[in-house]
Each structure stands twice: as C-alpha cells, then as structure tokens.
Amino acid sequence: ELIDAVPKARLDQFSRKAVHQEPLLEVIELQKTFRVKRGFLQPPREVVAADGISLTLHEGETLAVVGESGSGKSTLGRMILRLTEPDAGAIRFNGQDLRQLRGEALRQARKQLQIVFQDPFASLDPRQKIGDAIARGPMAFGTSRAEAMEQAKKLLMRVGLNAVAADRYPHEFSGGQRQRICIARALALRPRVLIADEAVSALDVSVQAQVLALLAELRQEMKLAMVFITHDLRIAAEIADRVIVLQKGRIVEEGATADVFTAPRAAYTRDLLDAVP
Ligand code: ADP
Ligand code: MG
C-alpha cells in the first residue's frame, strides 16, 4: 500500500540509490614510489608508499586508515587531495575522474575534499587573525567578506569557541582550540569529505575525546564522509564504521570496525592490536 502511494519514478530512483548507491569517493589501484637520494654515486633508495591501494567511501561514512608510522597513510591522504601525484591508479570523486580534472573543475572538486592535519600550529599562519583564516576559503569561491566573516563566527561557536576568537591570533589558543579552528576552517568550504590525518594524535587524551566527539557530531549534521587516518587503534575503534589496515603501502586487512578489531584475520593486525597498552 505504501509502495502504491509512491510515484513510480521516485520509487525507481529510491531503490536504485539504496541498492547500488555509488561511492562518493573511489580509489583504484594507487601506486606511489618515492626515490630518496642517498650519498654521492649511490643509487636512490626506493620507498614504496602505496602499492595498489583501492578503497571506497560512501556519503556519511567514516573510514579509518590505520598502520604503523611509515606505512603510507599520509601519502594516501595526500594523493586523494592531489597534493602528491600518484605514479598510477585512479581517484573517482562524485562520479568524476579527479586526476583528469583541470582548472575550475579541479578547484570545485578540491573544495569538497578538505583535510585537517596533526599539527594545527603549522597549518595556521601566525600573522593571520583566526576569522580571516576561516573566511579566506569561502571568499576565494566568491562569498563576500561580510558573509564569510559572519559564517566564520558561527562556525567558531559551533566548534566550541567564542565568536571573539575571530579577532585573535593562533598563538592565543591551546592545541585543542587550534585544532577546532582548523576544523572550522575546513568546514567553512562545506566539504563532502573530510580527511583527518592524525588530527587528534598530538592532543591530551581528554582534549582528544572532546575533539573526537565534535567530529562525530559534525559528521552527522553535515553528512560528512570522513577518512580518519591514525596510528592509534583506540581512536579508530571509537570513530570509524570501517577500517583499512596498511602495511608498507599495502592493504593487509579491511572490514567493519567491530570485525577487524574483535576478529582480525591478518597477523599484522593482530600484532598491532597486541601492542595497544
Ligand atoms: P605514514 O603517514 O603512515 O607514517 P607516510 O605516507 O608519511 O607514512 O610515508 C610512507 C613512506 O613514504 C615512508 O617510508 C616515508 O619515509 C616515505 N615518504 C613519504 N613522503 C615522502 C617524500 N616526500 N619523499 C620521500 N619519501 C617519502
Ligand atoms: Mg602520517
């Protein structure tokens, strides 16, 4: 009866979406080798940072990327953002081939993929007021200064800071506050995907929990998809729907968070879990 009441066209659209929903982001067989210079006359050392990495991310989903330091997590994040050019492979975002995009189309796609790094001090300009730092992105996409500033203040309040923070400088804030500022700055562009690269790793545990809770709320509110890069398995377990485990640029395990952490299949994952204090 309920189904009869729904126009046929909408029903088709709905079932298609439910059954075959296209991933928002799809990474296909990414490959990246760094050649690191050594001494005079020595050949460069080759470091394989990505060795055929494939993954999908759906709207609103949080995927954790875990693995030891040097396993290739940041390189993967940087390649998705096109900050590092892969040697081979494809990145599809919202139905487009990200690696083929140029000019304005690339700019628009990039706006929808934002990143928050580990060290919020390094990514904030010490001479720029917080409000300007947040407003800058939207202004570059045509928002008026007045409106961008208004939004910046609202976002600052949303991430738990006061609107007067807009007139202050980065050094006037704690590490946790600066991370909230970076989150506000990323969200000002209304992204569909947020990549968090060790975004809470440098924070004290209690501040870490607050920022994680904030991210979980924002994800819900904005239907954000997140790639949560972390070496900390406890954080991954807390925030992610799905986990991939990287070892030397390869995915050694992948699955629902609960499955991976309660019944890991790869020996490497078991070792990582055993190492958690
Ligand atoms: P993770 O984030 O998991 O710690 P990274 O992606 O930063 O790992 O690094 C993966 C490997 O690639 C490491 O061995 C690292 O030294 C190397 N690497 C990363 N970036 C560069 C670079 N720009 N030049 C040379 N080697 C790099
Ligand atoms: Mg890293």
Image (cartoon, rainbow, N blue to C red):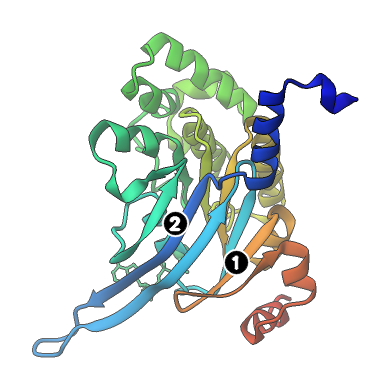
- The label nearer to you, 1 versus 2, is 1
- Quadrant containing the C terminus in the rendered view: bottom right
Q: Residues within 10 Å of mark 1 (few under 14, many from 20)?
A: many
Foreground of the two, 203 or 59: 59
Callout 1: SS: strand
Q: Give the residue drawn at x 72%, y 63%.
A: 257
| Amino acid at dot 1 | Ile
Q: Which mark is residue 77?
A: 2
| Amino acid at dot 2 | Gly
**91 lies above or below 272:** above
**Residue 147 on image: x %, y %:** 45, 11
Q: Are marks 1 and 2 in contact (CB under 8 Å)?
A: no
**Residue 149 on image: x %, y %:** 45, 16
- Quadrant location of residue 72? bottom left
Report whether the residue tagged 2 is closer than 8 Å to ligand 1.
yes
User: Do we see residue 183 in this rendering?
Assistant: yes
**Residue 84 on image: x %, y %:** 31, 57
Number of numbered discs visible in the structure rendering: 2
- Quadrant location of residue 201? bottom right
Foreground of the two, 25 or 228: 25
The residue where tag 1 is placed is: 244
Q: Is 209 on the left-hand or right-hand side of 52?
A: right
Q: Residues within 10 Å of mark 2 (few under 14, many from 20)?
A: many
